């Protein structure tokens, strides 16, 4: 591969850190699964408007291509090569009463983690056969869950377009892979090996073989963050006894995109903030202060509708799961206080 030609307006982390000497050092190496630099950077080369632009094909990628991944991880997460990630899933450490008990602002709460199966290639590098085996192993583990975590698995292959679209519109199912995932090799053989597991109430769901091999999701109407987190922790622990998760003392839970490393957790609320929406400078000052990310109501790369926003923690690596949820809770408390102050003006 020749050194890629990036447009001058490229602002991705890939453009920023793939200097020619890094390229020369990494262009001739590959991981034990045969994953190459060309594959790792293809998403950012094909999509110069990427924010990051790189994906890992296996856990080893983060170490084989460290000359590129390390500065990106330090820039995005503020996490140094000498830092160690720690995990805390003890819900007793969370200080989070419902920020909106009257249900005036928070429409729903969702907390998810990404996980990948230990010793297997990640989505960008996995073969069709291995992806199918991963699906079978995960579904076998899910079928052992009981109580409110008991549910059914629905493969995407064979799912009617109407059912699929309804699940997407109702915020339960992942969208068909976008151009960033396509160029990363994450949509190969679609929809083979992909699917969704959920309980009867759709408060506990697992996406299989989307951007990561598992997205473990707890969600419900309203703002009872503690209840959503407690259900998620039970699910992570239940699945973890059946499916070995890929983990690193340095990077935490291993994910295909470096932005999700560590806790691989995104804790979000869909929240109506019509007054704050009119003062985005004030809105973003609060989200910056509390390390929050603003997304639209259909998730990443979508727009807000009717003054409703998806507000979530931005930090994932170098903080614990409890701290990630605490970030979201404390930020939402501040956003609601600011919305109330504007209502009174
Ligand atoms: P992820 O959260 O897995 O990174 P997205 O941001 O694309 O992925 O969101 C996936 C889906 O989850 C989207 O349909 C989005 O609307 C939905 N979602 C995210 N947060 C919430 C929430 N708090 N309540 C309801 N749906 C949510
Ligand atoms: N769209 C890619 C990935 C950004 C982070 N979002 C993920 N992993 N879903 C980009 O580089 O912009």
Image (tube, grey):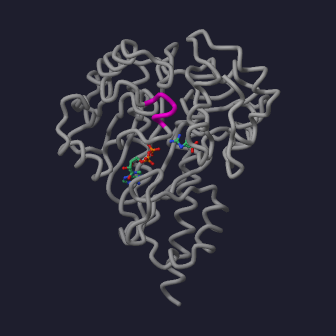
Observer-nearest of 149 and 291: 291
Q: Nearer the viewer, residue 198 or 6?
A: 6
State the count of labels: 0
Q: Is residue 302 magenta?
A: no
Q: Which residues are magenta?
A: 181-186
Is residue 340 placed above or below 72 in the rendered structure? below
Q: Residue at x 60, y 9 (%)?
A: 32
Please name the residue shown 23% across and 32% down the image: 151
Classify residue 327 as left or right of residue 111: right
Q: Is residue 105 left or right of residue 245?
A: left
Percent across and percent down for residue 252 are: 61, 29
Q: Is residue 311 above or below residue 110?
A: below
68 relative position to 89: left or right: right
Q: In the figure, residue 285 lies in which quadrant? A: bottom right
Q: Residue lying at the far bottom in this picture: please name it.
A: 345
Asked whether, in this view, residue 288 is left or right of residue 196, the answer is: right
Instruction: Pick out the residue farthest to the top.
Output: 32
Question: Could you tell me residue 208's position as x and y percent?
Answer: 36, 29
Residue 138: give x, y in percent of width and height. 35, 21
Whether residue 162 is situated above or below residue 272 in the rendered picture? above
Which residue reaches farthest right? 21
The quarter of the picture where the N terminus appears is top right
21 w.r.t. 77: above or below = above
Tell me which corner region of the image, top left, top right, bottom left or bottom right, holds residue 4: top right
Residue shown at 20%/42% (left/top)? 161
């Amino acid at each position: 591969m020749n050194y890629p030609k990036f447009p001058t307006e490229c602002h991705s982390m890939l453009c920023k850190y793939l200097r020619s000497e890094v390229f020369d050092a990494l262009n001739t190496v590959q991981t034990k699964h045969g994953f190459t630099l060309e594959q790792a950077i293809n998403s950012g080369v094909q999509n110069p408007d990427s924010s990051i632009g790189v994906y890992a094909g296996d856990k080893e990628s983060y170490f084989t291509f460290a000359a590129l991944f390390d500065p990106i991880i330090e820039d995005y997460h503020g996490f140094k090569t000498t830092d160690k990630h720690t995990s805390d899933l003890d819900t007793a450490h969370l200080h989070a009463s419902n920020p909106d008990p009257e249900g005036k602002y928070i429409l729903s709460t969702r907390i998810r983690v990404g996980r990948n199966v230990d010793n297997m290639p990640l989505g960008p590098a996995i073969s069709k056969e291995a992806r199918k085996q991963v699906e079978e192993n995960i579904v076998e583990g899910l079928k052992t869950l009981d109580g409110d975590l008991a549910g059914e698995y629905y493969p995407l292959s064979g799912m009617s377009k109407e059912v699929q679209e309804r699940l997407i519109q109702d915020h339960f199912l992942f969208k068909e892979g976008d151009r960033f995932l396509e160029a990363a090799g994450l949509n190969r053989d679609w929809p083979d090996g992909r699917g969704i597991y959920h309980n009867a109430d759709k408060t506990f769901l697992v996406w299989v073989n989307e951007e990561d091999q598992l997205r473990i999701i707890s969600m419900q109407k309203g703002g009872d963050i503690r209840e959503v987190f407690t259900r998620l922790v039970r699910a992570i622990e239940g699945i973890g006894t059946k499916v070995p998760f890929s983990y690193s003392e340095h990077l935490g839970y291993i994910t295909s995109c470096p932005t999700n490393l560590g806790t691989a957790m995104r804790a979000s609320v869909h929240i109506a903030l019509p007054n704050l929406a009119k003062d985005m400078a004030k809105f973003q000052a609060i989200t910056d202060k509390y390390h929050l990310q603003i997304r639209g109501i259909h998730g990443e790369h979508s727009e807000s509708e009717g003054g409703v926003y998806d507000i979530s923690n931005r930090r994932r690596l170098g903080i614990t799961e409890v701290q990630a949820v605490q970030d979201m809770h404390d930020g939402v408390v501040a956003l609601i206080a600011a919305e109330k102050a504007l209502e009174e003006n």
